[in-house]
Each structure stands twice: as C-alpha cells, then as structure tokens.
C-alpha cells in the first residue's frame, strides 16, 4: 500500500517536471489584438492637414516676400549666388586662421567694399567723363564734313564687293548709327546719375545680404537637405552640381572677361586710340559671351579702322584677337569648368544674350545661372527618375 502511494507520487512529480519542460520549450501564443485603426487614421489626417497648412502658408509668404523684395531682387539674388561661391573660401579661411565667423565675414566684406569703392570711383572719375567726351566727339563728327569722306570710302568698298547701295543711303545709315550710339552713351550716363540713390540702396542691401548669408550657407544647405522632398542623396547631388557649374561659369567668365578687357585697354592705349578705358569696359561686358564677345568687339573695331583708312590699327587688333584673346576662350574657359558639368558653348551664348534681353546687365550672370539650374534639374531627374533609372530599379527589385 505504501509502495503504491510512493509510486503514484513519483509519477506525478515526473509528469510535473515534463509539463514544465514543455511550457519552456513551446512558446506561448499571445492573444491577437485588433489594430487601433482610429488612432492611425487620426494621425494621417493630422499629418495631411499640417502639410496642407504649411504648404499654403509657404506659398502665400513666398509671394509676399517676392513682392516686398522685387525692387532689389537683382541685388539679393546676386548676393545669394556670390555667397554660395564664396562659402568654400570662407570655410578654408576659418580652418586656417582659426578666427570667429564674424571676423572672417568682416574680412571678406571689407575686401569687397574696397573693390566696390574703387569701381565706383573709377566709374565716376573716368567712364562718365570718357562717355560724355566720346558723345561730343561723335556729334562734332556728324556736324562736320567728315561724314561725306567716310561715305565715299564705304561706297568704294561696297562697289568693289558688287553691292549696289546709293551714297545717300550709306550716309543715312552712318549718321543714324552714330546718333544712336551717341544717345545711348548719354542715356546711360544720365540714368546712372538719376538712379544714384537706388544704386547705393541696392549696394547696401547686397552687402547686408552677404554678411548674413556667407557664414550661414552651410546651415542653409542642411535645411535644404532636411526639407527637400527629393531625399538627402539626390538633394546633395543637385546642390553639388549646381555649385560646380556656378563656380565654373560665373568665376570663369569673370576672369576671362577681366583678362580680355585688360589686354584690349592696353592695346588701345598703345595704339593712341582715345577713350581706351571706355572701350576696355565695353570689352569686359562683351567678354561674358563665350567665344564670341571679344571677337565682336575686336573685328568690329578693326572694320571701323579699315574704313577710316587706319589699316595698321586694324591689322594689330585682328592679330591680338587671333593670337591672345581666342586663346583665353579656347584654353582657359574649359579649364574653369569641371569636365562632368561642362555646357556647350552655343547654349552659353544663347543664355547670355537672352539674359541680357530679359534682365539687362545682370542678365550676363542670371542667364547662365538659370541655364545651369535647368540643366542640373534635368540631369538629376534623368539619373534618378528617367527610363534607365526606373528600369534598373525594377530589375533590382525583381532579382530580390
């Protein structure tokens, strides 16, 4: 009897240990909970409402800001572009000099103010006086009988080329051209004097924007990466390509134009041509048109000298264009732009000329910049969302 009771107790203990072992090995099933769809729907609706609100607010405020800054939009956009170009230099100076951001920014601004002061002084002291003197010389030339001599020379040249135009028409075209050129010079001088206050306001806003933007371009880039709907990788690639193109087109064109205008000014001065500074300034602005601007100026001047019978000056100008100025465009312009972001010269010519027609002198910069942004946008879209990119991602998904 005792033996049977002990046997039963041993069996019950054995069964208890076995059950405990099974409970440890076999996972317990958690009860299935139904998803709380109400909270999820409320979150999605709240997210949509927030996005709609901020989208509308951003759109309205952007329009109001555009209306507010429209009178000086050119100066502010120019400051933004220049800040984007100068920010790498700012970062290098900060690393090497270990100065505070305020000190580095102040150094850059002081250099720019000094350069701007020299340019303004140069314009007031030399260019305005030369423009007025040239306009007076043109009017004196028209009033004198020298126009008839010029007409006779042109008539002889046209006859040698079998082009039949009457001498009266030739004389009329010459007088009209000279009068228009003279009035443009005087009009530019008058407009500059009348808009002197607006000019100083625009310059002040330009430097104020530079002071704010130069040390903060890194922060602006981070904000752009955070808020961009394209994602960080695509946005970073977009910003990098745009910066490379801006640096190459703007800085490269400026350096080439400055070099070409300096060569032209020295050449005109050595040839004894009056108003050399004014002509060098015209050559500087024309130099922004790649492969074409300096040629328009030099060959145009050479034709005028040839018509006037000054053949030595004409030949020298053509040689300067072929031997020096062409090399600036052919050799140095491709170097300034990285190979992976180069733009066809024909597109750059179209952008510069169209920018001039749309924005005036600022179009020399705005035209290429708009083209740069458009090309960057198309290239980024093609690489990430084009047919080849879509097919590649589809193949990768099917393989997985």
Image (cartoon, helix red, strand yellow):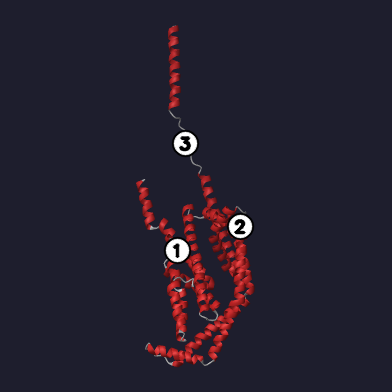
Q: CA distance from mark 1 to mark 2?
A: 29 Å
Whether residue 53 is visible to the viewer of this picture, yes or no, is: no
Q: Earlier in the sequence, mark 1 or mark 3?
A: 3
Residue sticking out furthest to the top = 1
Residue shown at 53%/45% (left/top)?
A: 39
Question: Quick one: 339 or 358, which is closer to the camera?
Answer: 339
Q: Nearer the viewer, residue 349 or 9?
A: 349
Question: Which mark is in front, 2 or 3?
Answer: 2
What residue is disc 1 on? 335
Quarter of the image containing the N terminus? top left
Examine the rendering and report whether any part of residue 138 can be seen. yes
The answer for how far apart the CA atoms under marks 1 and 3 are is: 68 Å
Vertical side of 267 occupied by 248: above or below: above
Q: Residues within 10 Å of mark 3 (few under 14, many from 20)?
A: few
The image quadrant that residue 295 belongs to is bottom left
Write the residue at 43% across / 17% down.
14
Label tally: 3
Q: Position of residue 49 (x, y in %)?
A: 55, 54
Using residue 163 as the reference point, say whether residue 72 is left or right of it. Answer: right
Question: What crowding class fits label 1: few (fewer than 14 Cα within 10 Å), some (14-19), or many (20 or more)?
Answer: few
- Mark closest to the chain's N terminus, 1 or 2: 2
Secondary element type, mark 1: helix
**Mark 3: secondary structure:** loop
Residue that carries the numbered disc 2 in the rendered image: 104
Which mark's residue is nearer the viewer, 1 or 3? 1
Q: Which mark is residue 32?
A: 3
């Amino acid at each position: 009897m005792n033996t049977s009771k002990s046997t039963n107790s041993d069996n019950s203990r054995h069964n208890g240990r076995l059950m405990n072992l099974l409970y440890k090995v076999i996972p317990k099933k958690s009860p299935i909970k139904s998803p709380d769809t109400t909270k999820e729907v409320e979150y999605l609706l709240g997210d949509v409402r927030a996005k709609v609100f901020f989208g509308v607010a951003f759109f309205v405020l952007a329009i109001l800001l555009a209306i507010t800054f429209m009178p000086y939009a050119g100066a502010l956009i120019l400051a933004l572009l220049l800040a984007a170009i100068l920010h790498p230099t700012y970062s290098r100076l900060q690393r090497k000099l270990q100065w505070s951001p305020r000190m580095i920014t102040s150094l850059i601004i002081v250099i720019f103010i000094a350069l701007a002061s020299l340019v303004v002084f140069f314009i007031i002291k030399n260019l305005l006086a030369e423009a007025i003197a040239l306009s007076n010389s043109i009017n004196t030339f028209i009033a004198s009988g020298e126009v008839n001599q010029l007409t006779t020379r042109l008539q002889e040249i046209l006859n040698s080329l079998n082009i039949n135009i009457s001498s009266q028409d030739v004389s009329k075209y010459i007088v009209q051209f000279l009068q228009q050129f003279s009035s443009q010079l005087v009009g530019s001088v008058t407009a500059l004097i009348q808009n002197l206050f607006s000019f100083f306001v625009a310059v002040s806003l330009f430097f104020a924007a530079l002071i704010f933007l130069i040390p903060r371009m890194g922060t602006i880039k981070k904000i752009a990466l955070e808020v961009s709907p394209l994602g960080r990788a695509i946005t970073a690639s977009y910003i990098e390509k745009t910066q490379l193109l801006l640096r190459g087109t703007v800085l490269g064109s400026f350096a080439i134009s400055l070099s070409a205008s300096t060569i032209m000014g020295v050449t005109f001065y050595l040839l004894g041509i009056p108003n050399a500074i004014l002509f060098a300034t015209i050559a500087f602005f024309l130099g922004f048109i790649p492969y074409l601007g300096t040629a328009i100026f030099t060959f145009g001047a050479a034709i005028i000298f040839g018509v006037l019978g000054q053949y030595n000056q004409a030949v020298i100008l053509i040689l300067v264009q072929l031997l020096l100025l062409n090399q600036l465009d052919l050799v140095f312009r491709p170097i300034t732009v990285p190979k992976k972001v180069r733009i066809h010269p024909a597109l750059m010519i179209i952008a510069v000329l169209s920018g001039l027609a749309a924005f005036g002198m600022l179009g020399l910069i705005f035209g290429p910049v708009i083209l740069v942004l458009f090309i960057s946008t198309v290239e980024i879209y093609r690489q990430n969302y084009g047919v080849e990119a879509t097919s590649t991602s589809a193949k990768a998904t099917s393989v997985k």
